[in-house]
Amino acid sequence: MCGRYFVQREAGRLRDYFGTEGDLPNHPPSWNVAPTQDSWVVRRHPQEGVRHLGVLRWGLVPRWAKDASGAAKLMNARSEGLAEKPSFREAARKRRCLVPADGFYEWRQEGKGKQAYAVALRSGAPMALAGLWEGWQQPDGSWLRSFTIITTEANAKQALVHHRMPVILPREAWALWLGEEAGDAWSDALALLRPSPAEELACWPVAARVGKFAENDAGLIARDPLASPPPELDDPSPYEPR
């Protein structure tokens, strides 16, 4: 699963990295994005044919939903059977998106407690998480736009923390996932939903306070000096975003 992540880059840097166009909303960096909160999403404008960077709410609300109360339960979408599940199948074919992230958090059972870990690309580049988005008309007539993050089976390294992980799309897959390539077939897009290579990821223990929604500062991604993780879950090189 992916239940928390961080986006510390500012909007202008995300726009340049993902090649989006148009005005940018005012939205601050966050080191603890949680379900039902707003965060950045890259979508392809169907008429203009260009990428736009906007702010949507995390936790999908299907178009047919009676209300938005179940959004938090749909923060993630399992890649397996994605095209058949009523909550995701229409969005999977028509409304795919990229979710920018600098990294995500996961919790590992260690003894009687759990240790939080941060995961980022070893290169220091932003992640492009595979996502889906939807528009739901609220009772007052306004539109709520929301998104979900797609998960898959964990690679060998991440499986030591949790058996699931978000799908991280490489740059060469973005156009296909967003539907920018001519003749885009759903079967081709579905083939992108696989775990990223373990050697591309850095992983390190962080303090337990990341589990509290109210905590949100750069210190959350610092290595926990009191933790004693196995060597394969404690990257020796400090994470440096580029």
Image: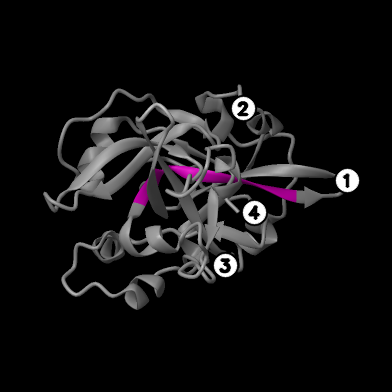
Three-letter code for the amino acid on which mark 2 is drawn:
Phe
Membership of 14 in magenta stretch: no
Label 2: element kind: loop
Q: Are marks 2 and 4 in contact (CB under 8 Å)?
A: no
Q: Which residue is mark 2?
A: 213
Q: Residue at x 11, y 49 (%)?
A: 48
Q: Which residue is mark 1?
A: 112
Q: Quadrant of the C terminus?
A: top left
Magenta highlight range: 98-108
Residue 90 image position (x, y, % from top left): 39, 61
Which marked residue is nearer to the observer: mark 4 or mark 3?
Answer: 3
Mark earlier in primary sequence (4, 3)? 3
Count neighbours of disc 3 (C-alpha within 10 A) and say few if under 14, some if 14 to 19, many if 20 or more.
Answer: some
Three-letter code for the amino acid on which mark 3 is drawn:
Asn
Q: Are marks 1 and 3 in contact (CB under 8 Å)?
A: no
Q: Residue at x 33, y 55 (%)?
A: 95
Q: Which residue is mark 3?
A: 155
Label 3: element kind: loop
State the separation of the CA atoms marked 2 and 3: 28 Å
